[in-house]
Amino acid sequence: MGYRKLCLDRPKYAHFLTYEELKNDPKTHVKKLAEFLGCPFEGEDVEAQVEAIVNGCSFEVLSNHEVNKGESIPARMGLPSNYFFRKGVVEDYEEYMSAEVVHKIDALTKEKFHSFGFIYGV
């Protein structure tokens, strides 16, 4: 949680972003990330540039690249490329975990994260 605190105390030095935030508002967060990295979007077509990045990095585009569809196992990864892509849907965990497990994770999340100001989704 030190990283989260650093992001709040010294935002020039650390950037914190959750999957849910990025999924909810990708254009805003792509702009913020570019600014954090010191290469903000410039010019008259900023929105088109951001849109191109968001579209090019979308789950649909990336998961459909031929290299990411394969079931062969590259030696450097130890897992098939398609292993890293599920549906790209927020709260998809409900299909993989029981209500009891979700409840336990939520309780642990509240206990461990809320005191650091990280209150998301629970």
Image: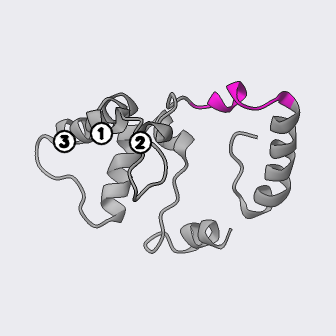
Q: Please, what is the three-letter code of the amino acid marked with disc 2? A: Ser
Q: State the residue in front, 72 or 112.
A: 72
Frontmost residue, 84 versus 43: 84
Find out whether the residues at labels 1 and 3 contact each other: C-beta distance under 8 Å.
Answer: no
Crowding at mark 2 (Cα within 10 Å: few <14, some 14-19, many 20+): some
Crowd tier of the residue under label 1, counting other residues whose Cα lies within 10 Å: few below 14, some 14–19, many 20 or above? few
Q: Can you identify the residue that label 1 sits on?
A: 67
Vertical placement of 112 versus 97: above or below? below
User: Residue tagged by mark 3?
Assistant: 49
Q: Is residue 97 within the magenta segment? A: yes
Residues drawn in magenta: 90-99
Q: Quadrant of the N terminus?
A: bottom right
- Judged from the image, the secondary structure of the residue bearing numbered disc 2 is helix
Q: Between marks 1 and 3, how big is the CA–CA gap? A: 25 Å
Q: Which residue is more in the foreground, 9 or 85?
A: 85
Q: Is residue 72 left or right of residue 20?
A: left
Query: What type is the residue that disc 3 sits on?
Result: Gln
Q: Quadrant of residue 59?
A: top left
Amino acid found under the numbered disc labelled 1: Val
- Residue 53, image x, y percentages: 26, 41
Q: Judging from the image, what secondary structure is the residue with disc 1 in?
A: helix
Tell me if residue 14 is in the magenta stretch: no
Query: Tag 2 or tag 1, which sits nearer the N-term?
Result: 1
Please, is residue 41 above or below residue 92 in the view?
Answer: below
Disc 2 to disc 3: CB gap under 8 Å:
no
Q: Residue at horizontal 69%, vertical 55%?
A: 118
Query: Which residue lies under the disc numbered 2?
Result: 81
Q: Residue furthest top?
A: 95
Quadrant occupied by the C terminus: top right
User: How many other residues sit within 10 Å of disc 3, few (<14), some (14-19) or many (≥20)?
Assistant: some
